[in-house]
Amino acid sequence: MYRRVLLKLSGEQLQGQYAGGFDAERAAWIANEIKKVENTQIVIMVGGGNYARGEQLAGSGVQRVTADNIGMLGTLMNALALVDVFNANDLPARVVTNIKADQVADQFTHRRVLSHLAKGRVVVAAGGIGRPYLTTDTAAVSLALELDCDAIFKATKVDGVYDKDPQQHDDAVKFDTLTLNEAVVRPDVKVMDQAAIALAEDHSQSIVVFELLKEDNIRRAISGEQIGTTIRK
Ligand code: UDP
């Protein structure tokens, strides 16, 4: 049983049935899945790849820093919409942002997040870690450490970590468990980007990779059932 967890949702998951942007139906489905979780505080780090990824957007005059700022703004757009849909579906939720956007969201502070969590609200963190050259995966690990989360739950399209892409290779083998060190050193194991997984290893932060779109998976994963791949010390 986990006391407090960080759920990482990528932009791709929030775009749902569309080629980009935000799918409110998908968000409502996620809200109803999260409502099944009892007695666990949940912080969500949202990605922004459904709007922009700095690495891809940079070039032809767009500076990398600008591109990353745009990426972070994309995560804020996701967070704002997600929290509205959560609240509309009777899942109390609040946005906090790591980039300054006074007009649209409260600034992240450690104390503010703990206060929301204590009141039973889901907290959605926007803006990654608030600096360029990073991803929301790295931001997720950093935030999980800062908030003393028991584990990170990384929701994905496939049901765990494989030695190669299971959508392209019939003989791909799924790992039920991995050590954080294996996730760092094995080239065939791709869980998060190198910076993110190295930070997790340095601080023994456990990560569970699981399939988002299966009914009850969020509840089952967070209640400690062995689904997906568990990566720990
Ligand atoms: N980003 C950043 N700093 C952060 C987090 C994100 O600069 O701390 C930018 C970066 O350009 C990234 C984009 O925001 O590509 C969107 O985040 P990410 O690619 O992690 O989203 P996801 O793939 O999870 O949808």
Image: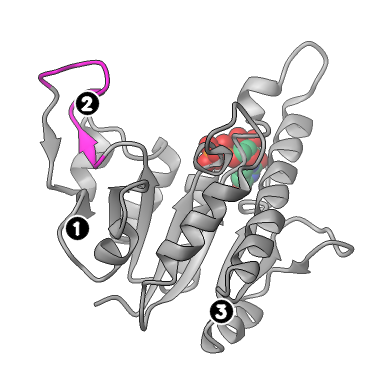
> What amino acid type should be assigned to the residue bearing mark 2?
Asp
Q: Secondary structure at mark 2?
A: loop
Residue bearing mark 2: 188
Given the image, on which type of amino acid does mark 1 rest?
Lys
Q: Which-is-in-front pick, marks 1 and 2?
A: 2
> Where's residue 194, x and y in %?
40, 37
Part of the protein shown in magenta: 159-171
Q: Is residue 136 left or right of residue 152?
A: right
Q: Which residue is mark 1?
A: 233
Q: Which of the image's four quarters has the C terminus?
A: bottom left
Taking the image as drawn, is residue 133 in sight?
A: no
Rendered-image quarter of ligand 1: top right
As helix, strand or loop, the secondary structure at mark 1 comes to loop
Q: Is residue 151 magenta?
A: no
Between disc 2 and disc 3, whose residue precedes?
3
- Cβ of mark 3 under 8 A from ligand 1: no
Asked if residue 65 can be seen in this view, the reply is yes
Check whether the beta carbons of the residues at disc 1 and disc 2 lie within 8 A of each other.
no
**Residue 195 or 221: which is nearer the viewer?**
221
Q: What residue is shown with label 3?
A: 121
Is 224 left, or right, of 152 in this rendering? left
